[in-house]
């Protein structure tokens, strides 16, 4: 048996991963990195027309990043023999993760009631685009669409042009929220002895990620607007031009404002009625930006970053992605790790940002080849070599 042991925190858990694309795999990756035995169940090649969605190369960085530390079992769930094997696996599993449209699991008999009849301790974790019921439950959910419907696109970019975020915010947040729900359900199971159905949606997760923007609207009626690189409720906060490039500045609150003025030796700004309060500084943002950039133009970004941080004022450079990984603090944190694929290719991954002092997560294995662990997973489930050969001959595995 080649069980992947990435950590000890979740070493007692068996997770069946039926999810695809990004949100579900993001959730399951967290479980795998902390030591859960994750079996990624995927159709044999050629069975599902969408099984390569966003997957040009299984050894490519995106697929590898999402599916590291997992084992792979191919199983044709369109055949009754495949469903029989899956139910056999459910009997000894702790968690099943899926992101089908809501009607699919009902049709397959993989809804929570059906799984609970097999294993009362099972936690079924589901991600959908728009929720498990309601007028949009049948719609396919893609991050691009959800960013627009969840409000993010309306506050991103500049007033003249709404802009999608450059990362899959809805997918990634839904995956992380689902992982949180799984942890809560497993903790509750310690008390009750029973599993439960945990589900989230891209739309609800996206709305939750809007955080202070929607809180301002729901409680004060303030309709969020896109404001480019400026912050909607604080000033000076945003990007400012220095001698050799752009500097990211965060001066929120009166204490930071006083420290900022002292560091720049501009006590006169404290006496300027245009900048007296946070609200005043927002109203007169253009004039304040012009004054700040006149000072910043005298020195390079690195000078101001060092000066302001030593004064207790949040400031930093604007990095490209390559510069992110050249930063000494990023290297010190151990933000990346490597593993080799079965073909020998070295893949580099971003590590889990949550650190457990005694039972940390780790990267132990690259993403598996399709069906790489089929025989051993089936053997663990009690199938004999003859039964496994018969399943292969029938196109089930």
Image (cartoon, rainbow, N blue to C red):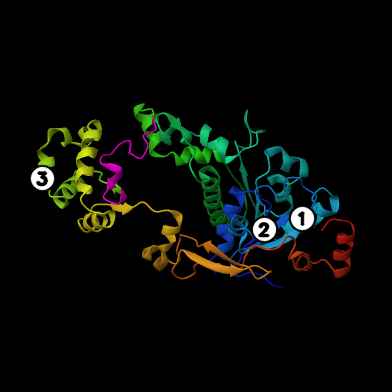
- For marks 2 and 3, the one nearer the N-term is 2
Q: Assess disc 2: are there few (<14), some (14-19) or many (≥20) residues with their C-alpha within 10 Å of its C-alpha.
A: some
- Considering depth in this image, is 270 or 72 the residue closer to the camera? 270
- Magenta span has 243? yes
Q: Secondary structure at mark 3?
A: loop
* Disc on res. 58: 2
Locate the C terminus by quadrant: bottom right
Q: Taken as a whole, is the magenta stretch helix, strand or loop?
A: loop
Asked which quadrant contains residue 345, the reply is bottom right
Q: Secondary structure at mark 1?
A: helix
Q: Which residue is tagged 1? A: 86
Which portion, as a residue range, is magenta?
A: 224-247
- Considering depth in this image, is 99 or 367 the residue closer to the camera? 367
Dots 2, 3 in contact, CB < 8 A: no
Q: What percent of the width, then of the height, locates residue 151? A: 47, 33
Q: What percent of the width, then of the height, locates residue 186? A: 57, 56
Q: Secondary structure at mark 2?
A: loop
- For marks 1 and 3, the one nearer the N-term is 1
Q: CA distance from mark 1 to mark 2?
A: 24 Å
Q: CA distance from mark 2 to mark 3?
A: 58 Å
């Amino acid at each position: 048996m080649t069980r992947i042991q990435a950590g000890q925190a979740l070493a007692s858990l068996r997770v069946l991963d039926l999810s695809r694309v990004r949100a579900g795999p993001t959730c399951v990756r967290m479980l795998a990195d902390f030591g859960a035995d994750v079996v990624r169940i995927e159709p044999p090649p050629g069975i599902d027309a969408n099984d390569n969605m966003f997957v040009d190369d299984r050894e490519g960085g995106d697929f590898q990043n999402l599916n590291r530390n997992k084992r792979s079992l191919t199983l044709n769930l369109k055949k009754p023999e495949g469903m029989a094997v899956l139910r056999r696996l459910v009997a000894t599993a702790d968690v099943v993760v899926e992101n089908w449209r809501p009607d699919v699991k009902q049709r397959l008999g993989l809804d929570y009631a059906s799984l609970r009849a097999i294993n009362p301790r099972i936690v079924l974790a589901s991600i959908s685009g728009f929720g498990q019921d309601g007028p949009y439950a049948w719609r396919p959910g893609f991050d691009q669409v959800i960013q627009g419907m969840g409000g993010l696109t309306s506050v991103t970019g500049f007033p003249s042009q709404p802009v999608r975020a450059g990362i899959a915010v809805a997918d990634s947040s839904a995956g992380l929220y689902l992982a949180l729900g799984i942890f809560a359900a497993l903790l509750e199971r310690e008390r009750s002895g029973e599993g439960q159905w945990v589900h989230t949606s891209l739309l609800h997760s996206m709305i939750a990620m809007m955080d202070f923007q929607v809180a301002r609207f729901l409680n004060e009626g303030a309709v969020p607007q896109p404001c480019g690189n400026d912050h909607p409720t604080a000033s000076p906060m945003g990007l400012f031009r220095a001698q050799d490039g752009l500097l990211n500045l965060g001066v929120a609150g009166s204490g930071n404002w006083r420290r900022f003025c002292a560091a720049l030796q501009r006590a006169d700004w404290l006496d300027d009625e245009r900048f007296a309060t946070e609200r005043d500084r927002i109203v007169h943002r253009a004039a304040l930006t012009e004054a700040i950039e006149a000072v910043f133009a005298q020195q390079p970004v690195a000078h101001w970053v060092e000066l302001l941080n030593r004064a207790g004022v949040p400031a930093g450079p604007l990095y490209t992605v390559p510069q992110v990984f050249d930063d000494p603090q990023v290297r010190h944190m151990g933000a990346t790790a490597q593993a080799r694929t079965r073909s020998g290719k070295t893949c580099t991954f971003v590590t889990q940002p949550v650190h457990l002092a005694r039972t940390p997560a780790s990267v132990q294995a690259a993403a598996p080849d399709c069906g790489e662990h089929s025989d051993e997973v089936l053997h663990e489930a009690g199938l004999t070599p003859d039964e496994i050969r018969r399943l292969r001959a029938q196109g089930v595995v």
